[in-house]
Image (cartoon, helix red, strand yellow):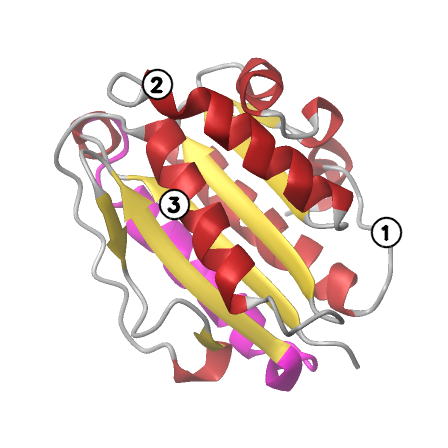
Amino acid sequence: MKPVFSVILIDASTSMERNFQNAPQQALEAFVRSQANSPDADDTFVGIFSFASDLKMLTAKPLVPVKEITDIPYISDGVTRLYGSVLEVLNLLENLTRHETEARVLLHVFTDGADNMSHEKLPALRQAAGAARAKGWTLKIVGFGIQGDALAREMNFSATEAITVPADAQSIIRTARHASYVTTMTSRGITPMSYDEYARNDH
């Protein structure tokens, strides 16, 4: 089976704690728990990053076997450096996967706000995202109370795969579970359900 590299990049600006309290932490734990219990776990490598005023790596290394993740130190504080953080992660993944031509790569971005710190990075981000999509990478963005498809178009992600959900704790946790489901289906070479279809069946 081809290895799967699945990366979560989650907003950690001050509004995330103010609006959602500990739901982001619960969502990250749900993603990791679901992946660790998957039959495909041995072929799944996960990286978790947060962003606010700067980018922080929450796993021991940029990509680690999912079963090795035991602690996710998510803390929210700062503004929304969205474009610069996504660009950093894409560049990091480009370097890490240079010799992993068979790997399936997924990047899931979660945010509750538009960029307010790194707008000058947008042209380079759009170029990097276009190159990643040309290689078959899956780039998804989830907007919590903000239009995910509009953000996707700005960043040159696929707007049809963008997700927009209400700004509430249940939606954050459900979208994390959906990201895990997408990772599992991708590892098996199966087209996953859309978020809307998944949510209708998620009880």
Mark 3 surroundings: few (<14), some (14-19) or many (≥20) residues within 10 A: some
Q: Which residue is mark 3?
A: 88
Q: Which of disc 1 and disc 3 is earlier in sequence?
A: 3
Please name the residue shown 16% across and 29% down the image: 14
116 relative to 197, above or below: above
Residue 17 shows in the view: yes
- Numbered range of the magenta stretch: 18-43
Mark 3 and mark 1: span between their CA atoms? 28 Å
**Which mark is in front, 1 or 2?**
2
**Which mark is in front, 3 or 1?**
3
- Residue 186: x percent and y percent? 76, 60
Mark 1 surroundings: few (<14), some (14-19) or many (≥20) residues within 10 A: few
- Residue 189: x percent and y percent? 85, 64
Which residue is nearer to you in this view: 81 or 48? Answer: 81
Q: Which residue is mark 2?
A: 120
Task: Find out whether residue 23 is within the magenta segment.
Answer: yes
Which residue is nearer to you in this view: 193 or 117? Answer: 117
Q: Which residue is mark 1?
A: 191
Q: Amino acid at mark 2?
A: Glu
179 relative to 64, above or below: above
Mark 2 surroundings: few (<14), some (14-19) or many (≥20) residues within 10 A: few
- Which picture quadrant has residue 197? top right
53 relative to 96, above or below: above
